[in-house]
Amino acid sequence: MAVRKLSVALEESVAAEAAEAAERRGVSLSAWLNAAAERALVIERGLAGVAEWESEHGELSAEELAWADSVLDRSVAGQVAS
């Protein structure tokens, strides 16, 4: 896998917590930050997809949003457990 080495600046508290989280997971800070960026990009693409769908079909109802929240809650709970 190709990688690009970057220099980034983080707030001190964010950098410290990220380093601790990486250590708990047993991965390098770079690997942890890469995974965090991947998750953020998935969320961003999902939100863009919802916005596109809503522009074509109208806003999701409160019931549909509640259902989606329950699916996401179960998904997150499964990730935390693993």
Image (cartoon, rainbow, N blue to C red):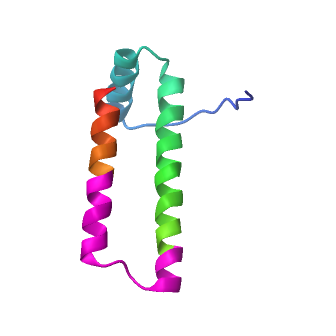
Q: Is residue 77 left or right of residue 7?
A: left
Residue drawn where x is 25% and y is 73% of the image: 63
Residue drawn where x is 53% and y is 75% of the image: 52
Q: Quadrant of the N terminus?
A: top right
* Magenta: main secondary structure: helix
**Residue 63 part of the magenta segment:** yes
Residue drawn where x is 47% and y is 43% of the image: 39
Q: Give the x, y percent position of residue 55.
A: 50, 83
Question: The magenta stretch spans which residues?
Answer: 52-71
Q: Give the x, y percent position of residue 78.
A: 31, 36
Res. 5 image quadrant = top right
| In this view, 10 is above or below 70 | above
Most extreme residue toward the right is 2
Res. 24 image quadrant = top left
- Frontmost residue, 22 versus 48: 48
Residue drawn where x is 31% and y is 71% of the image: 64
Q: Is residue 22 left or right of residue 9?
A: left
**Residue 72 part of the magenta segment:** no
Res. 75 image quadrant = top left
